[in-house]
Image (cartoon, rainbow, N blue to C red):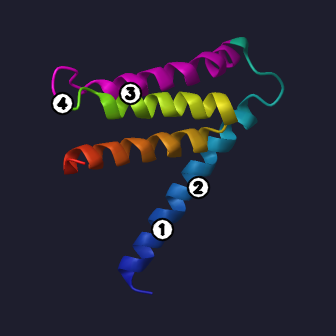
């Protein structure tokens, strides 16, 4: 094994160990009882993060110029409809992404 490969292997091993540690550490620290503040954060952070991601994704949409936000609106409605229908996040995200990409490509190509 060359020194470059050894260096890469060590880096990957350290990153894997640190990733595993961050996953297991809460279970080790809160073995007996989860503090109410942590439970509260577990309830409120996921919707807050999703909200921030939606705002970030839509921040550059121009409603006054073509295509007037139509691909974003259609994709957002598709995500909401798929989530309400199947309650499957992967399906919702994938479906919305496909609709968005198809619409942006079709509009860009003048179809």
Q: How many marks overall?
A: 4
Task: Give how far across and how far down residue 52 sits, in percent.
Answer: 42, 22
Secondary structure predominantly adopted by residues drawn in magenta: helix
In this view, the residue farthest toward the left is: 65
Q: Nearer the viewer, mark 1 or mark 4?
A: 4
Residue at 25% across, 48% down:
111
According to the image, label 4 marks what residue? 66
Residue at which label 1 appears: 10
Q: Residue furthest right?
A: 32
Which tag, 1 or 4, sits closer to the chain's start? 1
Q: Which residue is mark 2?
A: 17
Q: Which label number is shown at residue 73?
A: 3
Q: CB under 8 Å between callouts 1 and 4?
A: no
Where 53 sits versus 43, above or below? below
Secondary element at tag 3: helix
Report helix, strand or loop for mark 4. Answer: loop
Magenta region, residue range = 37-65
Q: Disc 2 or 3, which lies upstream in sequence?
A: 2
């Amino acid at each position: 094994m060359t020194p470059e490969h050894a260096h890469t292997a060590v880096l990957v091993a350290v990153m894997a160990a640190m990733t595993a540690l961050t996953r297991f550490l809460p279970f080790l620290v809160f073995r007996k009882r989860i503090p109410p503040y942590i439970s509260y954060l577990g309830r409120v952070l996921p919707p807050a993060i999703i909200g921030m991601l939606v705002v970030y994704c839509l921040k550059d949409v121009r409603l006054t110029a073509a295509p007037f936000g139509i691909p974003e609106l259609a994709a957002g409605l598709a995500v909401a409809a798929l989530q309400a229908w199947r309650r499957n996040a992967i399906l919702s995200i994938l479906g919305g992404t496909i609709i968005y990409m198809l619409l942006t490509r079709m509009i860009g190509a003048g179809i």
